[in-house]
Image: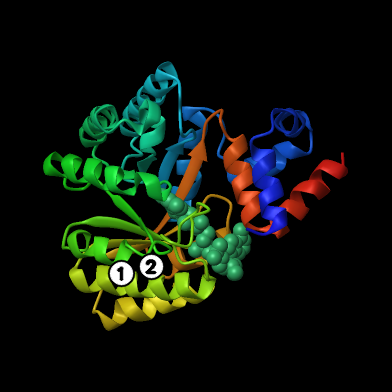
Amino acid sequence: MEPLRTLILAAADNDVIRRVVATAPGSRQIVARFVAGETVADALDAVRGLAADGRTATLDYLGEYTSDPELAEKTVRTYVHLLEELGAHGLARHAEVSVKLSALAVGGDEVLAGRALSRICEAAEACGTTVTVDMEDHTATDATLRVVERARQRWPWVGAVVQSYLHRTESDLASLAHKGSRVRLCKGAYAEPGDVAFTDTHAVDVSYVRCANALLEGGAYAMFATHDPRLVSVLRQRARWYGRERGSYEYQMLYGIRPDEQRRLATEGETVRVYVPFGEQWYGYLMRRLAERPANLALFLRALASR
Ligand code: FAD
């Protein structure tokens, strides 16, 4: 990992830096660019804003790797409340939710996480929307896919996520890329060792296209999560090649990242879903976004310095 990225990720775990960032007046506008706010009401406002120009959302209540059962319970309740509010405000057709199993149960306990996911799926079913289970680091891949598979027996619309940087992903798609299966394809966000993941960016991109082909060929509802302009245009060509109509796949990008491109794709009639994080635990998420792209870090430091 590059030194700058390592430094920023270390800052993500540092309480002093967290306090400085949280209280520095200039940081507010940068946080607001990547995080919708702290409350369910903020998340609903973000959905309305996106829906106004034809984009949909997947809402993520921030938090992961919880060691506190009360916090895990709070996370489940917040998702259930969020889904009820989406239904009550007529927003369920514009938004679904994304969940991390490590936030739903201490240690990502498979049985407890499965039960928690079921409560969230029941609430999603009641309001008429869907749930996607985010993929975390490679030590959780098997358990996460098992939990998704079990949930799909009752709710076939539960979305799975695969990461093109993992060597195993193409073979995982053999059982995931079938018709009716909602699968998000991303490059992968964790620092993984070379024995399980491609470390060369070109190899990750090549794997992304191979996995995209598998999803398009197999008839899955593919959710292409990437900001990469080259991949976006390759994906469109591949979708055409496989005779896919618009609406039989979608593009996904993160809140605040390449918003003009999101709008452009939506204007062209593509389905665009924006991953919208919200909640009190925004700090680690923000640091990861800054680590991914030094240009964002420069923006952030300028905003702090200008106050
Ligand atoms: P990168 O390889 O980071 O960048 C490629 C190119 O994209 C850059 O050269 C640039 O041209 C453009 N680009 C990238 N970032 C920016 C930016 N900030 N501003 C302008 N241009 C930019 N990871 C997981 O491990 N599990 C998940 O469940 C998961 N879910 C995700 C859901 C969504 C909707 C998205 C978008 C990502 C998700 N990720 C997830 C993160 C993902 O794995 C990548 O870490 C992240 O998206 C960066 O990869 P990238 O494909 O965007 O391209």
Looking at the image, which residue is at 69% across and 44% down? 30
Q: Which quadrant holds residue 246?
A: bottom left
Residue 299, placed above or below residue 219: above
- Which color scheme did the rendering employ for the protein? rainbow
The image quadrant where one finds the C terminus is top right
Cβ atoms under marks 2 and 1 closer than 8 Å = yes
In primary-sequence order, the first of circles 2 and 1 is 1
Query: Which of the numbered marks, if any, corresponds to residue 124?
Result: none
Q: Which residue is mark 2?
A: 269
Q: Is residue 252 above or below residue 213?
A: above
Q: Residue at x 26, y 47 (%)?
A: 145
Q: Nearer the viewer, mark 2 or mark 1?
A: 1
Regarding residue 130, the answer to whether it shows in the image is: no
> Could you say which quadrant of the image residue 171 lies in?
bottom left
Side of 49 relative to 141 (left or right): right
Q: Which residue is mark 1?
A: 246
Callout 1 amino acid: Arg
Q: CA distance from mark 2 to mark 1?
A: 7 Å
**Residue 133 x, y percent position in the rendering:** 33, 44
Residue 63, given in percent of the width and then of the height, sits at 48, 33
